[in-house]
Image (cartoon, helix red, strand yellow):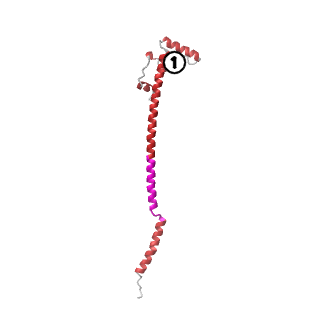
């Protein structure tokens, strides 16, 4: 949102004859007085405002209203940002907790799952025991008997 939109939303209207603080700033940046000294610029500006029938207090009041509108807008945007950051921090904590839970589940599964070496040892040990049992229960038939 640009400054003009902020001012419009805040209900700030252009002062009479259009001499807002923005107009005064434009006048100070004019090529006609840009290179003049500070005192000469001030005198030229005051003379132009007086010639247009504009009181300096009107311009200062306009500047004050516009500054308050910008400050208010900034405060609202800061609050929105803080709320957004708080939501994102909560989401990050929830994601972190879920990651830790899932990691713990997988770690438990891994620790309960026998390793390849353990499986080989178990098969090998069972295989020797099974072979002994097979030989004792089912002796080889003798071909010469």
* Chief secondary structure of the magenta portion: helix
Q: Residues within 10 Å of mark 1 (few under 14, many from 20)?
A: some
Query: x%, y% of residue 99?
Result: 45, 50
Residue at image mark 1 = 27
Picture coordinates of residue 113, whole percent (x, y): 44, 62
Task: Give the answer, above or below, for where 128 lies relative to 16.
Answer: below
Q: Total marks drawn?
A: 1
The part of the image, by quadrant, that contains residue 86 is top left
One can see residue 36 in this view: no
Q: Does the magenta-highlighted stretch encompass residue 97?
A: yes
- The residue closer to the viewer here, 99 or 115, is 99
Vertical arrangement, residue 85 with respect to residue 1, above or below: below
Q: Position of residue 48 (x, y in %)?
A: 51, 13
- Quadrant showing the C terminus: bottom left
Quarter of the image for residue 9 reads: top left
Is 41 positioned to the left or the right of 58 in the image?
right
**Residue 25 image offset from top left, x and y in percent:** 51, 20
> Is any atom of residue 46 visible in this view?
yes
Identified at 52% across, 12% down, the residue is 47
**For the N terminus, which image quadrant?**
top left
Query: Does the magenta segment cover residue 119?
Result: no
Query: Observer-nearest residue: 123 or 102?
Result: 102
Residue that appears at 52% across and 14% down: 46
Q: Secondary structure at mark 1?
A: helix
Point 46% across, 51% down: residue: 100
Residue found 44% across the figure and 78% down from its top: 132
**In the image, farthest residue toward the right:** 37
Does residue 145 lie above or below 25 as drawn?
below
The segment highlighted magenta reads: 94-116
């Amino acid at each position: 949102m640009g400054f003009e939109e902020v001012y419009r939303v805040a209900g700030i209207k252009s002062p009479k004859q259009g001499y807002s603080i923005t107009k005064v700033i434009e006048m100070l940046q004019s090529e006609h007085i840009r290179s003049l000294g500070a005192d000469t610029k001030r005198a030229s500006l005051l003379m132009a405002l007086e010639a247009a029938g504009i009181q300096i207090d009107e311009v200062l009041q306009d500047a004050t209203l516009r500054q308050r509108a910008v400050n208010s807008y900034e405060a609202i945007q800061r609050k929105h940002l803080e709320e957004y950051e708080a939501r994102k921090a909560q989401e990050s904590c929830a994601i972190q907790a879920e990651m830790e839970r899932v990691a713990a589940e997988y770690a438990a599964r891994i620790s309960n799952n026998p390793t390849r070496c353990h499986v080989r040892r178990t098969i090998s040990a069972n295989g020797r025991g099974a072979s002994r049992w097979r030989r004792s229960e089912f002796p080889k038939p003798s071909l010469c008997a």
